[in-house]
Image: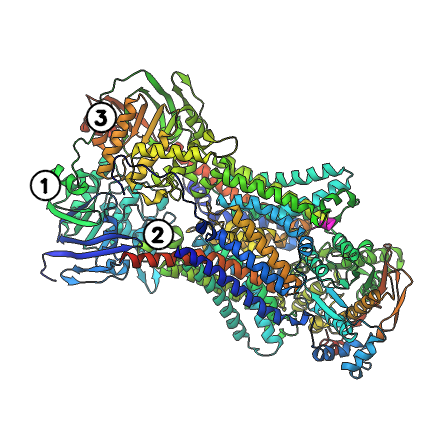
Amino acid sequence: MEQKSLIKKITGSREALLFCILIALGVVVTILNPTFFSPTNIAQIFRNNAIIMIMAVGMFCVMLTAGIDISITSTLAFSGMSIGMLQKHDIVQSTLLMFLIAMGIGCIAGFLNGLIISKGKVAPIICTMGFMYIWRGMAYVVGNSSWASGEDVSQFAKFGKDGTAGPYIILIVVYGLFFVLMKWTKFGRKIYAVGSNAEAARVSGINVDNVLISAYTIMGLMAGLAGALSVSIYASAQPNMQYGKEMDVIAACVIGGVSMSGGRGTIVGTFLGALILAIVAKALPLVNVPSIAQNTVKGVIILVVVIVNVVSQRMIDKQNLERREM
Amino acid sequence: MKRKALSVLLSAAMTAALLSGCGGSSGAASESAPAASESAPAASEAAPAASEAAPAADAASEAGADAAAQATGGADASGKTFAIVVKSAGNAYNTKEEEGFKEVIEAAGGTVVVKEPEAATVDAQITAIQSLISQGVDSISVAANDENALQATLEEAMAAGIKVNGFDSKTNADSRMTFVNQAGTQEVGQTLLDAVYDLTGGEGQYAILSATSQATNQNAWIDAMKSIAEGDSKYSKLELVEVAYGDDEPQKSTDQTQALLSKYPDLKVICAPTTVGVSAAAKVLQDQGSSVKLTGLGLPSEMAEYIGADDAHSCPYMFLWNPIDLGRLAAYSAIALVNGDITGAVGDTFTAGDMGDYTLTDAGDNGSEIILGPPFKFDPDNIAEWKDVY
Amino acid sequence: MAGKSGRSIKAEQEVSFKKLILSWEGALFILIILLNIFNASISPSYTVTNILREMPKYLAEILMMFPMAYILVLGDIDISVGSIVCLCATMTCFISNAGAPAIVTYIGCLAVGLICGMVNGAVATRFPELPSMIITLGTQIIYRGIAEISLGSGGSVSFNDTKKIMPLSKKIGPVPVVLFVVIIAAVIFTVVLAKCTFGRELYAIGSNKLSAFYAGVEVQKCRFIAYSLLGLMAGACGLFLTAYMYGANTTTGQGFEMEVIAMCVFGGIATTGGKGNLIGAIIAGAIIVLLRIALGQINLNSQLILVIIGAMLIIAVLIPGIQANLKARRKLKQAR
Amino acid sequence: MSDSEYILELKDITKIFPGVKALNRVQFQLKRGEIHALMGENGAGKSTFIKVITGVHAAEEGHMYLEGEEVHFKGPKDASKAGIAAVYQHPTTYPTLSVAENIFMGHEIIKNGMIQWKEMNRQADELLSKLHANFKSTDEMGALSVAQQQMTEIAKALSTNAKIVILDEPTASLTANESEELYRIVEKLRDDGVSVIFISHRFEDMYRLASRVTVFRDSQYIGTYDVDKITNADLIKAMVGREITDMFPKPDVKIGEEIFKIEGLSRTGFFKNVSLSVHAGEIVGMTGLVGAGRTEVMEAVCGITKPDEGKVFLNGKQLKIKKPSDAMKEGIILLPENRSTQGLILTWGLGRNVTLPIQKKLAKGFFNDIKKENELARDFLEEVDKGAVSIFDPASSLSGGNQQKVVVAKALAQDNMKVIILDEPTKGVDVGAKAEIYAIMGELAKKGYAIIMISSEMPEILGMSDTIYVMCNGRITGCLNREEASQEHILSLSMEHSDKKKEAAQ
């Protein structure tokens, strides 16, 4: 009886399922290449994917409202280039200020997205597509065909240096904060409510526009933070930073069980989804899969996960129907 | 009806906004506009680089108009328009090439058009070149993103009477008149292999971290390294364990470097013949305090952090050519092509201002090439001097 | 309103010239005229010959815009087309280099595209619960991944014998062959969407999938056809691109999906489905292409061009909302 | 506390939407502790009025007094703070969230800024058990039936300790015994001192519950009456503005040969071993509780879903129906239950809606024959006589009743029609339009079509059907002819199975 409920729990909860997949993945890779399971490797997985993971938090909020934001890596590049240039030209050198400036830029970008999407009733993908071009272009414009290199940002890069705790602390803080925020506070539940049924939310007195704007602003904030972190970790700022990675962020959320139609998903799921992608990226070179095949593997994983999800849901539905007495 | 009037109004406003937007931005982009009158900042910045391989030499004396007068070396480009198409926008290395190119052409009285494609893709370059054909420029110098893919477009340009030369990254022989090569392929391969030999102490494992798998230059250099190593027993104790590709993305390059480290605990040296890869790898090695050493091809400004003889630095020395000089030589050869001094045939010679005389040699692909010179070595002694140049 | 009995319902639609001009398509039409005047004034090279010469690459892209409009009208989205182009271009080269004659090469390329589109369609119709964005995100990565794997290290391939694909990049007078193909495709796709039963079904599905299904529309079949058509046309795009690039590499077609979707949306096709038409999309596509050509000719920073297009896109999608808002306000005033 | 007789009073309320006056100087008075019915045809302004009370809409003119003091609500929050709670017509639930969250949305239990989940779940369960609900606070809302969702909404209203509870057509999607449960809950509310405003189309609701009734018509206030002092006819007249003489114009039709037959149709989890037959000119009524499987059977017949086993015969010939278009080809036409999501494309013109199923038949090759389509659409729309001026008017511009008539026109336009299945044809349709739809059904029967009508409304089942099938829990539990059918009989049949189950459980 107890065993049955355990199985049910695992199949019933997306997070538990993902966790099992994660463990299985870890075990398989470790068997194939024992060096995988080492503290440095694990630490590197988090550090190298901190940027994707942080943006996944923002994307999670946006997708909860049934939206999407494909402008995030452009926002990241714009904020990253901005602080890179500020350092290059020796205008600002304080690490804290750098983070604040990058996050400020991200906030503004996110706010604009939210404003246009909520007040202008524009489809999220279209609005953010426009800003995808705009911010990426602006990143080139502020850089004026140059980039910030290791020496320009050497002071700032100390924060994200391999072996320092900076990126991990940011990761823990962001995930901890949002775990509480989304699950235990009114604000978080409002985001869920709007994504689940915007009309009902409006009728019950939730200001839907404000919730949308805050969700996109959070996304922007996270993209800005990721921009600063990216400059710090890679000790360089280039206008084509993280190009195309928005799809990885979306993929992480989707694998983590965040529904594109809104209202469903958890921060833990998002984290596990991002982690699975990160482990795959890390493991492939270690298990001698040519890195050229990495993209294909990633694509297959995305499709398999979402299809398995649908199929298992159908099976559960069917079982429920069969159990129904007539 | 009023609603309809409104939509017209709005679209008119949109057009107006567009007009003003374009007006403003075309002003901002005046660097590439024909009437560019800036010369002082570019020239002074380029001055230290005007000297060739020996950096300590007479840098200061060659500034400004002086340099220009010398640079022309009889080459006259007045009234002609020269275009340069780099690999992509927002890349410091490319900007340096443009700088050198501009300096020479403007000194010779010609007009420069700079095209920076929006992304490092072939179709962005095709678009740029097509636009240049429309504008009726006299010459196009292109750093190709793909060896063969520009052929149709460049043939069209040549058919329209435009002189085409490649530089930095080769196009195939059919789609160019000549190619300005930063360094001979064999030479680069030899230099890198010798560096690996030196750093490993003559034996042990080494790995290569390259750019994208289709990068023409990197592939040629890596092939050269392999064939030299095979052909000479001196290198028999060196073992190339893997060629990894970081796609010229910092994140992926970082991942790949870390993977190399955990996969091959006995690794001694990583050789990264690409500017993005080398700096990403340098950071990984230095941050981890790894004993693995790094060499390769990198921009001094990017790599200054990491170059040093002690164990606190990951890269004892590395190589590169001077991208400013590469741009200048591309400019000189373009002028020579336009003026008919050379046709692109092997054996042609021309004078590249103060850079001296160059001869077109066989590139081994039925086309000709002009080789800038051997790669230059950056070590702890000279890096401080060069990091501000490019 | 007339009395209950003997009232007859109007069945003729008033066609007013004013209405036609002041619709979104009309506004775009006026915009394109203004744009041409503007372009000609800023760029001395803005001539018909030059435009025709610079166009082919964009025309190849526009081939995909027509079926993409179908997909958007359905309320779906397909972000895998750029990758399909890449895979098709790659396979074209391999087929040709394996010694196949020209016609086999062409058909092979189109077939690869069609198969890719059919795979998208099959997954999308087999699992209608899944948002099309997710499916095509997966296949986007997979298709380009397959191209990357088959290209191997080196990452690019070119034709051994370029004669085979030459006819595609040929010109008849100053007019490139691809323009004729685009015109034929434009006519067929526009007429089918506007005048044929299939087009009506697409609109029905995009407006209300369930109602359409209850009314006997074969929803999944229509979706499958639309995805397949998009794959086919992506194949055609890939084919023409190889003709201009003499080969293919891993970046071929990168970002095309967004450009094509942007054209459709600028042309008034809503991503939510059921709205817009191809005439608007065609004019919008022309506007974007001509603007890019002209701004390229004055050597404007390529990134700034993208900023302008991004801003145009946002303004364009904001206008209907603002318009509706103003209209509602005016009506409110009248009612008082 | 004020000593005003009325807990809530609204005077001269005017609400303007772009282009229309939705409410025109409307009055309303609610006594403390009464159940007050609000009636009127669709589009009379009842729902708008409710939204003015709850602060969703701001009225342009007029005054609102709560406990004798004038109030101005800026939004729904103000109203809920003032003790007004509403249960809307379409359950405004959050399908992806838990029942507890749905109940406490907007007034979560918070301590130190943190939501107290355990406490919330406990209180939610308490409320649910008060309502005799058969589901838990942690269940996902989307998985519940409409009736269960409705119950959650009521629990939500209770959870705010509201003084005034507004129920907007709560019984529209409930069956007889579910309604009975609801009546009980509402009465209990009243006994606890809560004032209730109750909107409904069903007269039985009003008679059963309300003490007073207010009628709106065409955005205007018509009057307030004591329920026990007004006759049915007067009330209808007040609502419709004219007299309706014959509500159920059931024509005397000679029933012909068997046209349509279902044999042993089953679909796992929905219905089992369903058999029925319909003759020419016969109107077959299908009733039972919501969720008994009535709609599902007909959807399976029409190819919307796939049955697991069973046979369908038309004129003695077995049919193979795999998709809706197959059924249409055979002449089996379904008028689905939900007009706005299944029956019509609201953004489309009426004409296009009518001709959508037959566009391929009318087409010349691949091309739509627009001229023919428009003429045909006009003819059929005129036949059902609905309130549109042009066939190009969007369907969304019509009221519910007129939309239903467009759906009927859409069915009529299919010239090969043999069997017509109407699923809840008068759901949410006002009295006037109801009578017209019954008249059309009568006409169709006269022409010899086989008609199946699914309905939860006892009066129309009894008034219109020749034969009545009752379903319960996926099985047909009874087949009655017109003479032997009675409300009690049908009710007992429709609950037969569940009663047995209960017995077994005990």
Mark 1 and mark 2 on one chain: no
Mark 2 and mark 3 in contact? Answer it, CB < 8 Å: no
- Inspect the image, locate mark 1, and give the three-letter code of the amino acid beneath it: Ile
Is residue C189 visible in the rendered image? The answer is yes
Between the residue at mark 1 and the residue at mark 2, the CA separation in whole angstroms equals 38 Å
Image vertical order of residue C308 relative to residue D460, above or below: below
Residue occupied by mark 3: D250
Identify the disc placed on residue C228.
none
| Foreground tag (1 vs 2) | 1
Is D454 within the magenta? no
- 10 Å neighbourhood of mark 3: few (<14), some, or many (≥20)? many
Please, what secondary structure does the residue beneath circle 3 have?
A: loop
- 10 Å neighbourhood of mark 2: few (<14), some, or many (≥20)? some
Residue span colored magenta: C244-249
- Inspect the image, locate mark 3, and give the three-letter code of the amino acid beneath it: Lys
- Inspect the image, locate mark 2, and give the three-letter code of the amino acid beneath it: Glu
Between the residue at mark 2 and the residue at mark 3, the CA separation in whole angstroms equals 41 Å
Image vertical order of residue D331 relative to residue A42, above or below: above
In the picture, which quadrant includes the C terminus of chain D? Answer: top left
Residue D269 is drawn in which quadrant? top left
Identify the disc placed on residue A199.
2
Residue B158 is drawn in which quadrant? bottom right
Identify the disc placed on residue D230.
1
